[in-house]
Image (cartoon, rainbow, N blue to C red):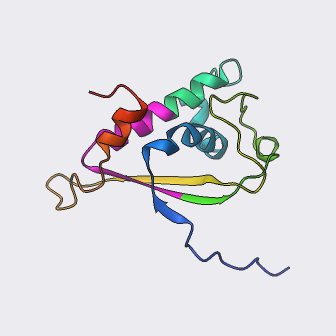
Amino acid sequence: MPFPPIPSFRSIRLAVPGDIMRLGVVSAAGFRYSPVFGWERPYHEQYPQDTLDSYREMYIGAMKNPRCVIVVATDAYDPDEGGKTEAIIPPDPGVELPKKGDEVVVGVAYWKFEPGSRREGQFNNLEGLRQLYIVG
């Protein structure tokens, strides 16, 4: 069976503060298969909202950190996405559900630069975070 075509990569961009809520859902769904997920989140099945919130807090911290950069991939929203993962995604994940086909974040990666990197501070958007959350 042939592989599907390789995407164009035009759907990759820097994360913005407005992505934070969606990043919780994407991370829970994707990282559910990590070998450390069960150790880090042993009560995920009982408290799935805590999983979403902990990922969101992690990304807020990374966005505030001048040594970090977060990159996201976007694609069309699939209303059945929650059924395609073993992670438990609450019916109301704390974010307005998009309509089928709307462009949403579907993947995420972040890096932390080495101390003294010339890129340090280049990717922070603290003003955007302040508009969404109380950030010191």
State whether residue 87 is above or below residue 73: above
**Residue 58 part of the magenta-drawn span:** yes
**Residue 33 part of the magenta-drawn span:** no
State whether residue 78 is above or below residue 91: below
Question: Percent x, y for residue 61?
Answer: 36, 36
Residue lying at 70% horizontally and 54% vertically, measured from the top left: 102
The N terminus is located in which quarter? bottom right
> Could you tell whether 117 is left or right of 16 in the image?
left
Question: Percent x, y for residue 2?
Answer: 81, 81
Question: Percent x, y for residue 124?
Answer: 29, 48
Q: Based on the displayed image, in which of its 4 quarters is residue 85 positioned? A: top right
Residue nearest the observer in this picture, 45 or 74: 74
Q: Residue furthest right?
A: 1
Q: Based on the displayed image, in which of its 4 quarters is residue 59 positioned? A: top left
Q: Residue furthest front?
A: 131
> Could you tell whether 45 is left or right of 69 in the image?
right
Residue lying at 24% horizontally and 56% vertically, measured from the top left: 122
> Could you tell whether 43 is left or right of 134 in the image?
right
Q: How many marks?
A: 0
Residue nearest the observer in this picture, 126 or 39: 126
Residue lying at 44% horizontally and 49% vertically, measured from the top left: 16
Residue lying at 63% horizontally and 20% vertically, measured from the top left: 43
Q: Which residues are magenta?
A: 56-72
Question: Percent x, y for residue 36?
Answer: 55, 37
> Could you tell whether 81 is left or right of 122 in the image?
right
The C terminus is located in which quarter? top left
Q: Residue furthest top?
A: 46
Residue nearest the observer in this picture, 42 or 129: 129
